[in-house]
Amino acid sequence: MTDRRSEPDTAFDWLAALPEAVCVTDAQLDGPGPRIRYVNPAFERLFGDAADEVAGRRLRGFLGGEADAAVSPEMRAVLRAGRTWRVCAAIGHKDGGILDVAWAISPVCDRAGTITGYVGTVTEAPRPAAPEPRGDASLESFENAPFGIYNTTPDGRFTWVNPAMAHIYGCADPAEFLSTFANTDVAFADPGNPYLPAYKHKASREAFLAEMASSGRVSGFEALARRKDDTAFWSQEDARAVHADNGTLVGYEGFIQDITARKEAERQLRENAALLEMAGRVARFGGWAADLGAGVVHWSDVVADIHGMPRGSSPPIDVTMAFIAESDRARIRAAFDLCATEGTPYDLEAELVTATGRRTWVRLAGEAVRDEGGEIVCVQGALQDISERKRVETKLRRARDQARAADASKTQFLANISHELRTPLNAILGFSDLIRNATQPVGEAERHSEYADHIFESGSHLLELVNDLLDMARIDQGAYTLCEEPVGLPEVVEASLKLVQHMARQKAIELTTDLPAGLPGIYADARALRQVVLNLLTNAIKFTPEGGRVSVIARNEAHELRLDVADTGVGIPSRDIERVLRPFERVEKHLSHDRRGGTGLGLGISRSLVEMHDGELTLRSTPDVGTVARVHLPKARLIP
């Protein structure tokens, strides 16, 4: 059962105010036929059933036996063709009496022309046949009919109308109508002199005559008409040609109803259906209904699009479940089965695999629909593509985790940096104090020289730490400016190797180079590029055991210049490669074969400096085998 509040309030507020009995149904014509979704108060009064009792019931119960939707192929054919179906029926009233009604049921379509439901209007008075032309005495019997009745000449002059006809056209009585209206060529050529045409447009009169010439009658003819004050309204007309005994056409007779309220209701429903359809497409939100008897699921266009299937698809229930990712399928199937058997609603998220193999996240909601006897006959619901929301959630979660990791890294860095700074400072102060207070004979100058070496080494390390901190701060604040000029890669490598030779000799590490002749120059900041190479060489030596090897290899590839610094060191676990490239992150200190520590900024600074040159720094490593740090510089940076 669908609550009226699930539809736009404006449409149902408008329908509630109509004096005509109106109901709105779904678009299901097969099987037991459409199910009522909404009835207005006039409908409740006419049939004596409250709206909550009617909603969810089949329309067939209000049409009468011969018009039963389940056995009426005529009704299905007319509605599927997009036309209005009309019928008069006698049905049993709730109070035990018989109710004579006239039904007019019309399709409601979205902007694409797809039928999304039906709107039915019903009046208590049955529709009579057109009157036989048996003279004025016979016509008087229709004086009190609740709809307009008329007679005209072949050229469109009205010869008789009943009071209801006069009232519909805004006239006080039939005499005023006859002196005001005529559907003649003269009236259309000069409206109001002396007559107003009853049709708003001459094309309506021409269409009336064409249909009359074709079949001798018109049925359900809808046209814009005009009142005496020239305001327009919608009319529905049924008429037939009248012939004399010799077969000569003597005129037309028929009856007319004002259907403006129904036409407006249909327009409002179409507009709201279009708005709902548009909103569904924007929000990637559509409806579906599982027919438990037929074992199939009817999809809206949006739901079919989400699945990557043709629109209008109604696959078997088991097939629809196959679209759900295997990890979620059992959970969704269990929720659906519980809804189909016990009526338990559900609202779940799951991953869906489309017909093209694309994976996307969807929100699935379902509820049971029961028949008059309370049996569950259908499960209906909605499906929404939430892949964008999931993507944003994942991005936010990743950013949160990265922020937490960065915060933890900085906290650890602050804890470590005090030790890293104090160690060389203590050495500098201690050895300086020994020299200052020395009382040794001059012959012990060798020991003073050793102290001086320690002081120099500690001071150099301290300077390195401070420079790293300053460089990282400038990069973080966007204050590091490149001073770009033509630079030769071999010169940069040679200058960097000189600075690490002493460090390599202390550990008996072999330094090798493979720099082919003819390497192109690079448009770069020479100091920044030297710092990158120096940082990579220092790291390689630091984490390579004694007797190992560190190599510098350059290659001019088709789309980039590549510089590798490879070592035979302890390597880095694959899970830590991305981590050590971030600022403030370090490889475990016990893996280093150098007694000095570090800030953990070297690789982070190098990566940032390479990216400032439009390049990329990557690591490839195997534990206990070694590491290759690779600098990729784009072709656009090279100087032929």
Image: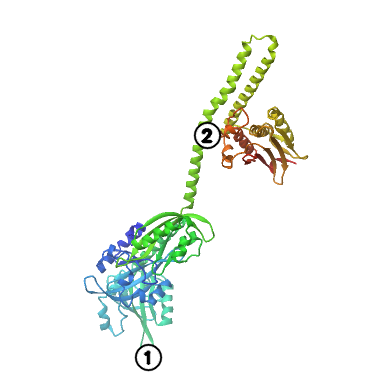
Is 3 displayed left or right of 568 in the figure?
left
- On the image, which quarter does residue 523 sit in? top right
* Alpha carbons under labels 2 and 1: distance apart: 108 Å
Q: Earlier in the sequence, mark 2 or mark 1?
A: 1
Which residue in the protein does label 1 denote? Answer: 246
Disc 2 marks a residue whose amino acid type is: Ser
Q: Residues within 10 Å of mark 1 (few under 14, many from 20)?
A: few
The x and y percentages for residue 582 are: 57, 37
The x and y percentages for residue 541 are: 66, 32
Residue sitting nearer the eye, 604 or 255: 604
Number of marks drawn: 2
Residue sitting nearer the eye, 48 or 236: 48
Disc 1 marks a residue whose amino acid type is: Asn
Above or below, 444 relative to 313 = above
Which residue in the protein does label 2 denote? Answer: 409
Above or below, 569 relative to 31 = above
The x and y percentages for residue 358 are: 53, 57
Residue sitting nearer the eye, 309 or 301: 309
